[in-house]
Amino acid sequence: MNQLHHRVLQVNKAYIGIFSNNNSLIFNQEYFEGAPHPIVKKGQGWKIHCLQADLYFKDVTKEFSNLENLDGCFYVLDYDRIIEPLIKAYDNTLIALGDWSTLEQKAEDKRYTLFGNLGLFFRFTLKILEVKHNILSFHACTLYNNKENQLLLALGGTGGGKSALLLNGISRGFKIFSTEITPVEITDNRIVIHRSTLRNNIRLGHLIYDFPEIMRDLGLEFHDVEDVWGTKVQVDLGRYGYKGDTIVDPEIILIIPRIEEYNKECQYSIGKKSRKLKRILLDNVTDRVRMLTLIYESVQVKPDALDNSYEKRVRLVDGFLEKANITKVVNVFASPKNCLDWV
């Protein structure tokens, strides 16, 4: 271990060590800090494969001296003679052996790589949070009313409309607490929502056409792009964020959104907790841990390399449904401009 380069990242309550014989892989700025997006003419915007689109983390390498106390260990062994990469999990350790330098050069979609925002390390981290700290990682964004301790938790997959809902919430004065992943800790007697990333991969069209006032407020200008709805840029929405690190036992309004650009009116239904909600939540939190089949367009990731905690996940979802103060479940079919008209 001492012969490898390493760094330690803190993600909420978890401390995860990254080890490699190739220093450049584990300190690659475009994954951990972000590479400037070429479409950005003025202001800050990054390419969407940066890990900060999904994880809020701190580099605590200097402060964390005892590597035996890590919650998880992620090993990247880079050798140019490896023809067939190998990914193997042992309890809270994952080892990736391969010619990763060559694969990095050939990667077409860098989101699905070792350290891309939808890649191997991201999903391994969610597993460690779940196993070690009873933290479910909902694929969801949140808007917060701190005066009422009320949290709007919007579930959804890619393309479901979370970004549009966030931008609409900003325009209405809500604070953001998470943009893509919402970490929820289930303890014996309370629910704790942990701080998450406030960067977000946003379609250009939402900024240019739906919420130009937010684009101006962020100081953003873009070069001409042919397909504004098919182009995303990672932006920092931190100026609209709630400043605390945790939110304890809030009133929760669960939102299941379907946002489409040209809906003229906000159609919605409001219900309460029901038996089918368990399946919806379980599918949601399993989505980001398990659903990775290939990295670098060619390297297979077997499900057991990431997900050996399904039974515990079921118990945590049961605990969330039992302890969380869920007052409403809202199904919304609307456009970006009217998706919160029911509030």
Image: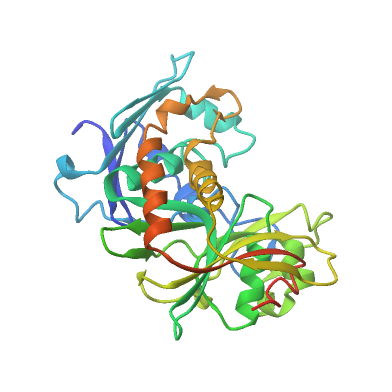
Q: Is 174 or 203 nearer to us in this picture?
A: 174
User: Can residue 150 be seen?
Assistant: yes
Which residue is at 48% across, 53% downward? 138
Q: Is residue 32 left or right of residue 140?
A: left
The residue located at (35%, 46%) in the rendering is 130
Report the residue at 27% width, 63% height from top. 189
Question: Does residue 222 appear in the picture of this structure?
Answer: no
Q: Quadrant of residue 232?
A: bottom right
Position of residue 42 measured from the top left corner of the image (x, y, whole percent) = 66, 70
> Where is residue 74 shown, x and y percent of the image?
33, 35
Dividing the picture into quadrants, the one containing residue 193 is: bottom left
Quadrant in which residue 270 is drawn: bottom right
Q: How is the image coloured?
A: rainbow
Is 143 displayed left or right of 37 in the figure? left
What x and y, as percent, mark residue 131? 31, 42
> In this rendering, would 58 be left or right of 237?
left
Asked if residue 70 is positioned above or below residue 198 in the image, the reply reads above
Residue lying furthest front in this view?
A: 275
Quadrant holding the N terminus: top left
- The residue lying toward the viewer, choosing from 333 and 211, is 333
Residue drawn at the location 54% of the way across and 36% of the way down: 291
Position of the C terminus by quadrant: bottom right
